[in-house]
Image (cartoon, rainbow, N blue to C red):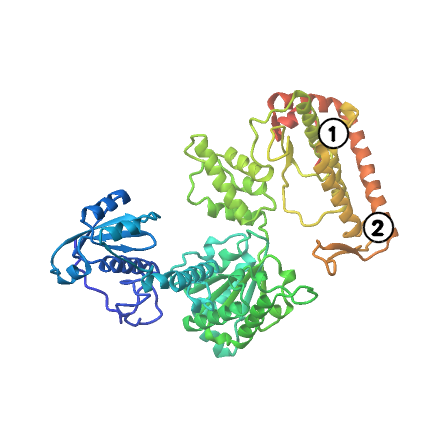
């Protein structure tokens, strides 16, 4: 059905782009929606022209008939052919002589005979004996046919290659003039629905950004007193902590346009393109002020230029232009620069000085309360059983960031659907957490009975050591169900509270628990297996940090033995380790690590020998049921209380 809606006025303000009135576009324009130019039009036009030229080149009063060469000679002998036109490919016979053709009526239709040329030495004699006129013509081509392969086709090939290159470089429609245009995604005012209430676990970071929102909403309060809002705010934190979400929340709360761009979007293969895009970005930002410009992954263009052997002219020019723009623009214009990175240590110092990124906001991993708040936000739209305790879930996820917790909620929902339940139960959250930590459960992995028994003793060794080690985290679960790529079983411990400081005894306790699995194998079988490889790596790392970083050794008490990673000069090899202490000190570190681990191992051996009956009993039950929770494990200890 035809639409009778009134056509929009081209001079009226665009509803989707509030950048002012648009100029009317001509009907015949390469960018006009009514006619969009394409190089296929040229190719089709050339082909049509060739066909028309070929068709018009023929005489309309001649009807051509293709016959065999033998029949062609017979028609010469019979007198039907009186004139022959010879070329390199064919013979054309006409029933009239040249004089008769001139006298014939132009409207008269004449049948001509054509045959493929055959090298017959008697053919000329045959025509002479029958008084047939004959003449030869040279091969001639239409000029457009000669022009096509020599000029038109190479030009078309170059145009196709040119368009392909610019499309690969990310330009808009392959236009050469778009190289300097930034590729930011502009979100209009009011389109961002994220608010500070949607961000949890980073209360301190939100407080730092409240001033930015307040300035964008009422800048006169600050300018009246002579104050200036920070030009730039740098969000620093681990991946998944919510830096981008915070930036969106600032734009949503302030209700201003939001420019979003990644650091890698500035850099291209041509030197100077990145700098042009920076200029274009800041030009658009000033026109849209007040607004927020968010640059994600700032380290892509903001790497330090100090102590760098290999130079990158494009990245350095982009960084220099960014420094100039940030230093040159007035903060009272209402343009706020937000940037995010998880590698602040490699940023150029010029970026971090006052006047550019004045404020650095740490977006840290959430604590217990923060994790519970994040879980509440992500579980708003999911159906949960009333018995689900998110505080327990938060306690089971130490070290998880916001992205991890969102994934846990989603995995729990998927598990509930898989089990054909209409609501998420506590077990779904526990399974989702285990899947996140230890990997996917391998239900079909075949393990022979001997290895299964070794794994059971190994995991019970960990659990018994944890139960009898003062200061150890409470036991949550012991299982011999394979998970992930190489985990044949695992022991889960859940801390009761957030810990930020650990003593010497608590660190040694962690080492004891890690060595409990190998010690159990030694006691039962008199030999050890490769199953403790990951445990030994973690134990060695803890002891090494105790000596080199925490100053907990007898000889180098309160001394840090630092190591730095430095690039190998003149090579492309991986960075090497540069020690700042002598070889004798390194020998002491190695010997001290071996001594502490050996003492810990002997202590765990004695502990498990004293509790060998419990080791055998719990292992037998674990082989039967495959998984023991904390309550079942405690009951199998015959009332032996866990250490507090």
Quarter of the C terminus within the rendering: top right
Near-viewer residue (505 or 572): 572
The reply, left or right, for residue 476 in relation to residue 518 is left
Query: x, y percentage for residue 7?
Result: 21, 64
Q: Which residue matches tag 2?
A: 586
In this rendering, the answer to whether 413 lies above or below 528 is: below
Label 1: which secondary element: loop
Q: Which residue matches tag 1?
A: 529
Image label count: 2
Near-viewer residue (382 or 108): 108
The reply, left or right, for residue 595 in relation to residue 346 is right
Label 2: which secondary element: helix
Query: x, y percentage for residue 336?
Result: 49, 68
Can residue 618 be seen from the camera position used here?
no
* Mark earlier in primary sequence (2, 1): 1
Q: Kindly indicate the quadrant of the structure image that contains residue 492.
A: top right
Query: x, y percentage for residue 394?
Result: 56, 43
Q: Residues within 10 Å of mark 2 (few under 14, many from 20)?
A: some
Q: Which mark is residue 437?
A: none
Can residue 564 be seen from the camera position used here?
yes
């Amino acid at each position: 059905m035809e639409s009778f809606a009134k056509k929009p006025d081209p001079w009226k303000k665009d509803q989707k782009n509030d950048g002012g009135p648009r100029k009317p576009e001509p009907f015949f324009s390469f960018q006009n929606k009514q006619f969009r130019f394409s190089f296929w039009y040229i190719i089709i036009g050339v082909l049509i022209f060739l066909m028309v030229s070929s068709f018009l080149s023929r005489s309309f009063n001649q009807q051509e008939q293709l016959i065999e060469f033998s029949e062609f000679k017979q028609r010469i002998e019979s007198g039907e052919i009186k004139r022959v036109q010879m070329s390199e490919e064919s013979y054309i016979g006409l029933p009239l002589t040249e004089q008769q053709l001139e006298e014939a009526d132009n409207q008269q239709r004449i049948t001509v005979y054509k045959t493929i040329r055959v090298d017959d030495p008697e053919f000329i004699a045959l025509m002479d004996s029958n008084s047939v006129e004959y003449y030869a013509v040279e091969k001639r081509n239409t000029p457009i046919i000669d022009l096509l392969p020599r000029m038109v086709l190479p030009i078309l090939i170059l145009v196709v290659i040119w368009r392909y290159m610019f499309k690969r470089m990310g330009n808009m429609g392959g236009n050469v003039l778009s190289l300097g245009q930034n590729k930011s995604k502009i979100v209009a005012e009011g389109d961002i629905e994220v608010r500070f209430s949607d961000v949890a676990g980073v209360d301190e970071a939100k407080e730092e950004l409240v001033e930015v929102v307040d300035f964008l909403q009422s800048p006169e309060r600050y300018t009246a007193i002579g104050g200036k809002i920070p030009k730039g705010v740098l969000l620093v934190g681990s991946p998944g902590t919510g830096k981008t979400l915070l930036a969106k929340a600032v734009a949503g709360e302030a209700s201003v346009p939001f420019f979003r761009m990644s650091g890698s979007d500035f850099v291209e293969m041509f030197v100077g393109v990145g700098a042009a895009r920076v200029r274009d970005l800041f030009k658009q930002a000033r026109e849209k002020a007040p607004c927020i410009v968010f640059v994600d992954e700032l380290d892509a263009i903001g790497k330090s230029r100090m102590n760098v052997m290999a130079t990158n002219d494009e990245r350095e020019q982009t960084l220099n232009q960014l420094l100039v723009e940030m230093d040159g623009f007035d903060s009272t214009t209402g343009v706020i620069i937000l940037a995010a990175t998880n590698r602040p240590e490699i940023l150029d110092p010029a970026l971090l000085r006052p006047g550019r990124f004045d404020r650095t906001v740490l977006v840290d991993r959430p604590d217990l309360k923060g994790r519970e708040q994040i879980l509440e936000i992500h579980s708003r739209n999911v159906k949960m059983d009333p018995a689900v305790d998110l505080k327990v879930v938060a306690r089971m996820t130490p070290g998880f960031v916001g992205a991890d917790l969102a994934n846990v909620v989603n995995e729990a929902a998927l598990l509930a659907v898989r089990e054909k339940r209409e609501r998420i139960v506590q077990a779904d959250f526990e399974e989702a957490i285990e899947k996140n930590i230890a990997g996917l459960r391998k239900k079909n992995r075949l393990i022979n009975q001997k290895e299964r028994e070794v794994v059971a003793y190994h995991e019970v060794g960990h659990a018994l050591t944890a139960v009898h080690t003062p200061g150890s985290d409470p036991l949550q679960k012991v299982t011999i169900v394979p998970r992930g790529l190489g985990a044949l079983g695992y022991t889960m411990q859940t801390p009761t509270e957030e810990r930020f400081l650990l003593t010497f005894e608590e660190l040694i306790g962690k080492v004891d628990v890690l060595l409990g699995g190998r010690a159990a194998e030694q006691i039962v079988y008199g030999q050890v297996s490769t199953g403790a490889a990951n445990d030994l790596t973690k134990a060695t790392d803890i002891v090494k940090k105790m000596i080199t970083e925490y100053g907990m050794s007898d000889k180098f008490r309160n001394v840090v033995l630092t190591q730095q990673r430095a690039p190998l000069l003149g090579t492309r090899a991986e960075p090497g380790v540069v020690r700042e202490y002598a070889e004798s000190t390194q020998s002491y570190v190695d010997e001290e690590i071996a001594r502490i681990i050996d003492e810990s191992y002997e202590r765990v051996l004695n502990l498990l020998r004293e509790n060998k009956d419990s080791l055998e009993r719990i292992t037998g039950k674990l082989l039967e049921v495959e998984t023991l929770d904390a309550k079942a494990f405690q009951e199998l200890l015959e009332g032996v209380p866990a250490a507090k």
